[in-house]
Amino acid sequence: MPSAYRPPFRPDDGRGGVWSALFRKRTLRLVPKEGDIATVKSDLLNLDRTRDLFVWFGHSSYLLQTDGVRILVDPVFGTASPVSFLLGEPFPGTNIYTPDDIPEIDVLVITHDHWDHLDYNTVTALRNRIGRVVCPLGVGEHFEHWGFDPEMLIELDWGEATELPCADGRNIVFHCLPTLHFSGRGFVRNQSLWASFLVEAPSRKVYFGGDGGYDERFKRIGARFPGIDLAFLENGQYNLRWPRVHTLPDELAKAMLHLGARRYMTGHHGKFCISTHPWDEPYVNEKAAAAVAGANLIVPRIGEIVPLTEPSSKG
């Protein structure tokens, strides 16, 4: 299979390594200018629960409504790092939502405990509006430490699943599945699990890939769950220095082909600078990968309400 796209990788930009590049992130086009990224502020507090839709908040944060169930995935409405002056500060004009804009949530899904996927300020502000938390093994310890009721927490190992009721009495199933990544919020790594999740609702199957380098899991997941309706895949913050923890551009088409979903959206870009590629390179990657894979690609604005019944949305 031909490569989808092979950009001029900049693992260290030739002048001092990744950290040096991040100090020079504006001169290397790592950060966009105000207005470069399209956004729209939607009224989420008055969403009709009967509408099947999703909203992308930038990076890897999503709101999904399906079958009367409201699901929030990896919400980060602040910075994505404890050292935001260097990396993790939102791109200009992209941080348009706060926890106050988010409606009641039935299920909060957390893929892993990195700062850009699990934000203390966001989840604690939402605590009284969250019904259940579904997360990989060990991640629940953070929530308990932050004052969440342990009865709210559902921790899953790879291959495990949990069922929760839909509004019509049927069940929605959350499958915890593998990915190729790591975890940790400080100097100690891998004390909790990292995962991807397949949401199997009565009317559709939606896959959240989380973070992870390419491997054979996409074939296995595609074979186990044929006919995935929508898949959210990682596409951004990659670097040749860490090829096994983030999907590289020339691997994205393979992931799409092997997963076999009807529609795709890519994230892990559009809001934070955590690597050394130009801020807009992932937008080129996704279109090239979709062309190679023959994939139906959705490219929404940050904050746009996207109906799940539409065949596609042009970016």
Image: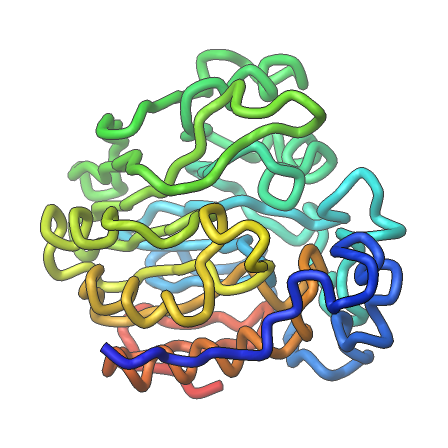
Q: Quadrant of residue 125?
A: top right
Q: Quadrant of residue 3?
A: bottom left
| Location of residue 261 in the rendering, given as x and y in whole percent from the top left corner | 22, 65
Q: Residue at x 60, y 62 (%)?
A: 58
| In-image side of 151 versus 58 (left or right) | left
Q: How many marks?
A: 0
| Location of residue 220 in the rendering, given as x and y in whole percent from the top left corner | 16, 47
* Colour pattern: rainbow
Vertical order, 275 against 155 (above or below): below
| In-image side of 35 versus 179 (left or right) | right
Q: Residue at x 37, y 67 (%)?
A: 252
Image quadrant where one finds the N terminus: bottom left
Q: Nearer the viewer, residue 144 or 11?
A: 11
| Location of residue 111 in the rendering, given as x and y in whole percent from the top left corner | 46, 38
Q: Nearer the viewer, residue 161 or 180?
A: 180
Vertical order, 29 against 75 (above or below): below
Q: Residue at x 28, y 45 (%)?
A: 199
Q: Quadrant of residue 180?
A: top left
Vertical order, 244 against 171 (above or below): below
| In-image side of 24 versus 153 (left or right) | right
Q: Residue at x 18, y 54 (%)?
A: 219
| Location of residue 60 in the rendering, given as x and y in whole percent from the top left corner | 54, 54
